[in-house]
Image: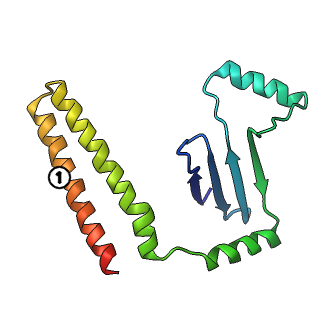
Amino acid sequence: MDSQKIFICECGSYCHQTIFWYNKEDKQLHFTTHLITYRNFFKRLWVAIRYIFGYKSNYGDWDTFLFKPLDEAKLLAYLNKTNLTFKQQLEMDFIPAIEQMAEKERLHLQWLKSQNAKKEFIEKSAFFLNHYRNRLKEYQEYASKL
C-alpha cells in the first residue's frame, strides 16, 4: 500500500469508514468499505460461517471494490476537479484536529488535577495545552489571511 486516504462517516463511528489506496506495484486503485467491526472472536466466526453458507446482510458488513483502469482514470479525473484548496484543507482538516488535541489535553489536565497527580505531570500537561492553544491561534490567523 503506497498511499491511502481514509474517510470516516459523518456519524463519527470509526467502524463506518471508506479507504482508498493506490498500489504502485500492481498499478491499481483499491476501495474498501467497512460498516461493522466485531471485536468478539465468536461473533466474527459466526458472521464468517453465515457468509460461507451464502447469507448476505441487508445492510452490508464489508466489501472491497477493485477499479478497472478506465474507471480509475474517470474517478481520478473527477476527484482532481474537486480538489480542496490549501485553505480549505487547513480549515476542514488541520485546524479541527488541533482543536481536538487541545480539548483532549484540557481534559487530561483536568483529570490529572482531580487525581492529585505529581506536579511535574500537571506542569507538563499544562505546557502542552498552552502549546496547542498557541499553535491553534497561529493557524487560525494564518488561514484567515489566505
Residue 139 vs 81, above or below: the answer is: above
Residue depicted at x 15% and y 27%: 117
Helix, strand or loop status at disc 1 = helix
Q: Quadrant of residue 88?
A: bottom left
Looking at this rendering, what residue extends furthest in the front direction? Answer: 11
Q: Quadrant of residue 141?
A: bottom left
Task: Give percent across and percent down for residue 63.
Answer: 76, 45
Colour mode? rainbow
Residue for badge 1 = 130
Q: Quadrant of residue 126?
A: top left
Q: The disc labelled 1 sits on which kind of residue?
A: Asn
**Observer-nearest of 21 and 9:** 9
Residue depicted at x 75% and y 69%: 72
Residue 145 vs 43, above or below: the answer is: below
Going by the image, does 135 lie left or right of 58?
left
Dividing the image into 4 quarters, which one contains the C terminus? bottom left
Looking at this rendering, what residue extends furthest in the top direction? Answer: 42
Q: How many other residues sit within 10 Å of disc 1, few (<14), some (14-19) or many (≥20)?
A: some
Residue 67 vs 38, above or below: the answer is: below
Residue 124 vs 142, above or below: the answer is: above
Q: How many marks?
A: 1
Residue depicted at x 73% and y 66%: 27
Task: Give percent across and percent down for residue 121.
Answer: 16, 35
Going by the image, does 120 lie left or right of 5?
left
Task: Give percent across and percent down for residue 41.
Answer: 66, 21
Residue depicted at x 69% and y 73%: 76
